[in-house]
Amino acid sequence: MPPTINTDATDTPPAKPIRRPRTLKASLNSWLRWLHTYISMFSLLLILFFAGTGVTLNHPDWTFGGVEKQQQFSGSLPASWQKNGTADALSIAEFLRAKYGLHGIASDFQYQGGIGGLSFRTPGYSADVQFDQSGKYSVNVDAQGALAVANDFHRGKNSGGAWLWFIDASGIFLMVVALTGLGIMLYLRKVRTASLISIVVGGAVMGLLMWRAM
């Protein structure tokens, strides 16, 4: 007996569920999560670096095996160290860079009463130069270990304008991470109260410690 065919059946596909428009609250929560996730990943190394060097700055006696290297040099400047009867800072700096490998930002140049000097500075490194009107000079070099270099980068000491800009940008990134994390927490009802209490307690402890340190 042939099978019965149901002529009432249709091949119409099932209707797609109607998507409700996302509310402003849900959209904001989604953006906060996106910002928090990707900025946290982007700034992960920044957080580790500034957190770690923040601890080592608080313990200047820690060296982790780093060795401070001090050197002294002396000699006579070439004839080109003077131009038009006065000391030429560029000629002196370039001569010393080439002869001793001095590096960093050359600054604090002075020449008065037949006595002059200048300094080379970079994170974890300094070279102080003194010279007189006869062209005789002395150089004192202080090259510290890797930990001192990292600490100076944390403080932006002798690191140049580009790195100072980078520190500012890093601070902004970290503030965004903190604020987006706070925003996400406010959307989570189960932990909202406990999180707010934790923030208040943490702020109170920090304020108390600052007050006692003054």
Image (spheres, grey):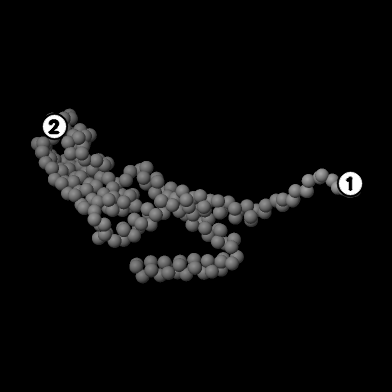
Q: Which residue is mark 2?
A: 78
Q: Which residue is mark 1?
A: 2
Q: Residue at x 42, y 69 (%)?
A: 205
Q: Which residue is drawn at the image coordinates 64% and 56% (left, top)?
A: 25
The kind of residue on which mark 2 rests is Pro
Secondary structure beneath label 2: loop
Q: Secondary structure at mark 1?
A: loop
Q: Quadrant of residue 57?
A: bottom left
Depicted 173 relative to depicted 105: above or below? below
Please state which of residues 107 and 197 is positioned toward the viewer in this rendering: 197
Q: Position of residue 93 (x, y in %)?
A: 21, 37
Q: Is residue 147 rendered to the left or right of residue 190?
A: left
Disc sitting over residue 112 in the figure: none
Picture layout, residue 7 above or below residue 50: above
Residue depth check, mark 1 versus mark 2: number of the one nearer the observer: 1
Which image quarter holds the C terminus?
bottom left
Q: Position of residue 207 (x, y in %)?
A: 42, 67
Taking depth in this image into account, of 116 and 32 the one nearest to the observer is 32
Sequence-first disc among 1 and 2? 1
Q: Amino acid at mark 1?
A: Pro
